[in-house]
Image: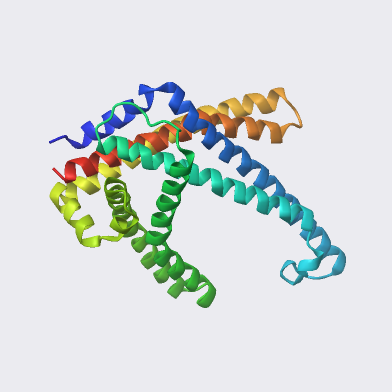
Amino acid sequence: MASITDHVVEGLKYPFNDIKKLLGCGILFALISALSVFMSTKSLDIFRYCVHLAENTNTTLSHIPLSQLPAGDIYIWVGLAILSLIISLFIFGYQYRVVRFSIDRKEDLPGFDDIVSMLVNGIKYFIVIVAYNIIPALILAGGIILVGNSSVLLIISLISALLFIIAFFLQIMALNNMVAHDSLKKAFDIREITDNISNLGWGKYIGIIIFTIIVYMIIMVAVNFILSLITGIFIAAISNQAFFVSIFIAVIEGLFIDSYGAIFYNRVFGSVYRESIK
């Protein structure tokens, strides 16, 4: 039986088994990162327009009629959001394949053939994530809307946070169970999911996940520190080009870092499932 570190070490090495496929996944993340920059810029433009309009009409932001909002900018933002969602579904679909390859003990990285299947699997992956997080999200949103700023909201927030944590640990095994059986229904078979965790041991299961997250966060912090230094050099060298610098950094992070992280932790979680069903 593999130890906690064995799973994580194997996961850290796995993305390097095929650099081309790693970069192929990175292209999808780079597109998402670039679109996020464009969306943030467009959101800022819309906000500035609304502030300017509110100041000139002596009204508040919440009372600006929809008809006076910049329709062109909003349509562009919505279009970018839809495009981002579609690319995200393909990313989820690729992560689905990484888990499948991990369960099957395949050492190579999955390819990008049969994009229809990848999109369908990405939709299933997305549905599971939303389903497992919707209850704590609704509780938190309801608390903010109905209670407002009070000590009761703090209690609701803590309850919501606890539910998010529980949902996260169950969601990982649920995704694996879905992939293993290629059935969306299996993602909601709570009895089988908890039995699998019990087979591995709740302590070991939680320990692997926490250790994986810690390693992932250390990698992200280290890389982001390096990227921040690069950003500083670019800003010093290229004045008044903050937008292009942001795009460059976002693409680099998505191409090399986000893709590596996604493949790494999906590989680890797939191997955890494989051990739980022995």
Image quadrant holding the N terminus, namely: top left
Establish if 102 lies above or below 146. above
Image quadrant holding the C terminus, namely: top left
Relative image position of residue 18 (x, y in whole percent)? 39, 22
Could you tell whether 26 is left or right of 195 in the image? right
Task: Name the outermost residue toward the right.
Answer: 56
Instruction: Identify the residue at horizontal 41%, vertical 52% (top origin).
Output: 124
What is the tally of numbered marks visible in this picture?
Answer: 0
Chosen colour scheme? rainbow
Could you tell whether 113 is left or right of 188 in the image? right
Quarter-of-image position of residue 138:
bottom left
Establish if 14 lies above or below 147. above
Relative image position of residue 9 (x, y in whole percent)? 27, 29
Asked whether 105 or 213 is in front, the reply is 105
Q: Can residue 265 be seen in this view?
A: no
Instruction: Identify the residue at horizontal 31%, vertical 46% (top origin).
Output: 179
Instruction: Identify the residue at horizontal 31%, vertical 56% (top origin).
Output: 187
Instruction: Identify the residue at horizontal 18%, vertical 49% (top origin).
Output: 203
Could you tell whether 228 is left or right of 21 in the image? right
Q: Is residue 243 visible?
A: yes
Asked whether 244 or 71 is in front, the reply is 71
Establish if 31 lies above or below 183. above
Relative image position of residue 186 (x, y in whole percent)? 28, 56
Could you tell whether 57 is left or right of 203 in the image? right
Relative image position of residue 34 (x, y in whole percent)? 62, 38
